[in-house]
Amino acid sequence: MSTDRRIASLTPCAGRCSTVFGDSVCRGCRRFNHEVIKWNTYTAEQHTAIWCRLDAQLDQILIPMLPQADIVHVEGFVLSKRVRLRPDASKGRKLYHALKLCEKNRHFTDDSGLGIHYKQVRPLWDEFERRVLALATASYDLAFLRADAIRLHLLQNMDEED
């Protein structure tokens, strides 16, 4: 019998997948539906590309929303709560995990380093979710439009060659 205990691979999954209900973008992790489905088949480079896109979205939304945050304190807080982070996790990713922890337990707010009052957690979380889902959906729509434009361009080139 093997005593090999492997640590599960780190995924963006937030445990609230909505792609099973037909969403193109998961409301939990904000990956595209095909990324959720095929995650375990992707290479490390593909994982990194997805993480980078997701982290860029978190940076774009959360850094301006939490201007008083002390990122060193936030990182220590998140790690003290045993949240696994990629070594290249962005500032927005760390802020996200701290805010998520505080959303689940507002008593953590004073120790989080976010620089907010516990009464601000719920409104901030709700506004964050609204903004980040809108951004992720726009990213999906843009990717779809690009793919469709490439397809049309290829079809035109094929027609011209005939």
Image (cartoon, grey):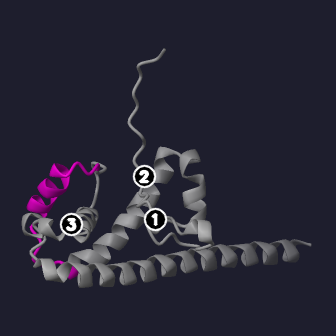
Residue that badge 3 annotates:
105
The disc placed on residue 16 is: 1
Q: Residue 9, relative to residue 26: is it above or below? A: above
Residue type at the position of mark 3? Asn
- In the image, is residue 144 part of the stretch drawn in magenta? no
Mark 3 vs 2, N-terminal side: 2
Disc 2 marks which amino acid? Thr
Looking at the picture, which amino acid does disc 1 mark? Answer: Arg
Q: Residue at x 18, y 51 (%)?
A: 79
Looking at the picture, how far across and down is residue 27, in whole percent?
47, 72
Give the CA separation, mark 3 to mark 2: 23 Å
Mark 2–mark 1 Cα distance, whole angstroms, equals 13 Å
Answer with the quarter of the image where residue 22 lies: bottom right
Which residue lies at the image location 13% right of the left edge and 77% below the top edge?
118
**Front: mark 1 or 3:** 3
In front: mark 3 or mark 2? 3
Whether residue 112 sits left or right of residue 125 in the image: it is: left
Query: Which residue occupies 9% across, 77% down?
Result: 68
Question: Badge 2, how many Cα within 10 Å: few under 14, some, many 20+?
Answer: some
Camera-side residue of 7 and 31? 7
- Residue annotated with mark 2: 11
Residue 83 covered by magenta stretch: yes
Mark 1 or mark 3, earlier in chain: 1
* Magenta-colored span: 64-84
Assess whether mark 1 and mark 2 are in contact (beta carbons under 8 angstroms).
no
